[in-house]
Image: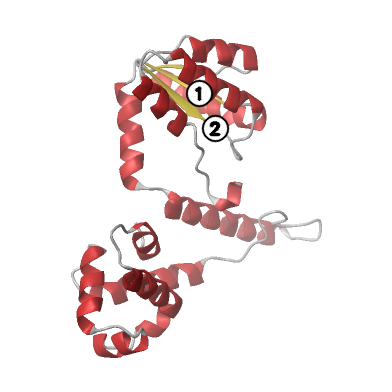
Amino acid sequence: MDIKRKITDARGLTPTEQQLGISALAMGEDIRGLSIKEFAARTNVSVASVHRFCKKLGLEGFKDLKVELIRLTTEAGNRRDVDINFPFDATSTPAQVMERMEGLYQTTLAETQELLNPTQFDHAARLIANARQVDIYTGSHNLYPAGMFRDRLLSAGKSATCHDNAEAQVHTALASDRDHVAIVISYSGLAPISRKSCRSSAAGMSRSSSSARHTARACTPVLPPTLR
């Protein structure tokens, strides 16, 4: 997890520490030549506040904060700026197409990494590992990658479904129980199939209110900005 994610996801920060985090991120590369006293002066806090802030982020001290911020700035500078919607056109040479596609993948992977929460990611993996069956709900152009993931699960010995029509998905959701895990793939979360399947899955497990609430939360999509 990079420093930006650590700061934005940190819990228990005081208003002063939250503002300190915003200031630190905005400072970026400029923090390189600063001592902790100079940094504290620029951000209008005490040296002790800087130490507490670093500890809450899981860092040893100000030196680690500097290293993390410089790394973040360097990685951002190495990314190529590419128009996500139109990465190349008819006048682009093969070399330009390859370079821009490389930049596009770098941006997508970086934004995905920024959004992923390792704790939630591990929890999702455990749910899938412990489930008797994994049911994947999606539609349209998402069916192909979803089908590939289903095939990977099947090849690993995990029972999985990914139906290509709404009726079959709803029936699967209604037949699900606490031993099933639902994976919903949707860019917006507004797809009729996904929303209907979520409601049906929660209704199918109404015998356990905690399971129904868990299913509703699991149906909330999280995608990198590049794919929204």
Asked if the residues shown at circle 1 and circle 2 are in contact, with their CB atoms under 8 angstroms apart, the answer is yes
Residue 192 to residue 226: above or below: above
Which label was assigned to residue 185? 2
Asked if residue 98 lies left or right of residue 53, the reply is right
**Residue placed most toward the observer, 89 or 38:** 38
The N terminus, quarter of image: bottom left
Q: Quadrant of residue 191?
A: top right
Position in image of residue 31 (x %, y %): 36, 83
Residue 81 to residue 66: above or below: above
Location of mark 1 (residue)? 136
**Residue placed most toward the observer, 75 or 194:** 194
**Rounded to the nearest whole Å, what is the CA distance between mark 1 and mark 2?**
8 Å
Position in image of residue 27 (x %, y %): 42, 80
Q: Quadrant of residue 36?
A: bottom left
Question: What SS does tag 1 mark?
Answer: strand
Mark 2 nearby-residue class (10 Å; few <14, some 14–19, many ≥20): many
- Count of labels shown? 2
Type of amino acid under label 1: Ile
Q: Residue at x 41, y 48 (%)?
A: 116
Question: What SS does tag 2 mark?
Answer: loop
Residue lying farthest to the right in this orientation: 90
Q: Residue at x 43, y 26 (%)?
A: 215
Type of amino acid under label 2: Ile
Can the viewer see residue 165 in this picture?
A: no
Mark 1 nearby-residue class (10 Å; few <14, some 14–19, many ≥20): many
Tell me which numbered mark, 1 or 2, is placed earlier along the sequence: 1
